[in-house]
Image (spheres, grey):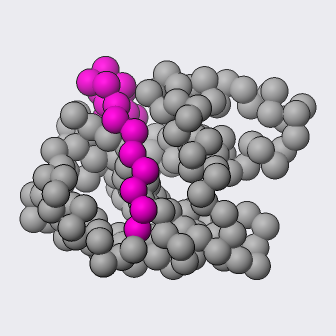
Amino acid sequence: MSTLTVWMFDTPTGAERAVETLKRLDEQDLIQLHDAATVSWPPDKKKPKTHQLHTLARKKALRGAFWGLLFGVIFFMPLLGVAAGAAMGGGAGALTDLGIDQGFINSVQERVVPGTSALFAFTSDAVLDQVKEAFKPTGAELIQTSLSDEDAAKLREVFGDDDD
């Protein structure tokens, strides 16, 4: 089963440092990493910065669109006001169509605030106890949403993993 996992950090640099942990776990076949992105929110900034992990040219546009939609709905739509929010309502609906519900979005909105960071990962086949143990020294808090097989297939299609 595939999951969209979010690891929360109480510093703006925690997520970037944890990317190496995630890559190492993937190399050790303890998790299959389809894609990941980080959000870093320095305490003196009005909005967070995002960074996508994978940058393969042929898949970059679809992956970028997914992460852009997700981060736009989570971080930027609340700042746009009612009128702009109504215009972007389709964004939240598109995420729901991919199995990412409003509860997940609300949970991330509440936790990723100035002075924090988060590592978002679309993965499968995780050896959970070893993954959790590897992340323990980072001080990360885990938020996770499990995706149905159908929703995971839709995300794999977005990420182009059918032909990897």
**Side of 29 where 153 appears, left or right:** right
The residue nearer to you, when weighing 161 against 73, is: 73
The verdict on residue 59 being magenta is no
Where in the figure is residue 43, as x and y percent of width and height?
Answer: 71, 77
User: Is there any visible trace of residue 16 in the rendered image?
Assistant: no
* Camera sees residue 163: yes
Q: Is residue 49 above or below residue 126?
A: below
- Please give the range of residues in magenta: 140-159
In this picture, is 153 found above or below 142? above
Q: Is residue 20 left or right of residue 128?
A: right
Residue at image point 32% right, 40% down:
3
Q: Quadrant of the C terminus?
A: top left
Q: Quadrant of residue 82?
A: top right
- Could you tell me residue 76's position as x and y percent? 73, 49
Query: Looking at the picture, does residue 43 appear above or below residue 104?
Result: below
Please give the count of numbered marks on the rendered protein.
0
Question: Does residue 150 show up magenta in the picture?
Answer: yes
| Residue that appears at 36% across and 76% down | 138
Q: Is 108 on the left-hand or right-hand side of 144?
A: right
Residue sitting at x 54%, y 68%: 117
Image quadrant where residue 63 sits: top left
Residue 114, image x, y percentages: 69, 69
Quadrant, the N terminus: top left
User: Is 124 placed left or right of 143 in the picture?
Assistant: left
Give the x, y percent position of residue 147: 34, 31
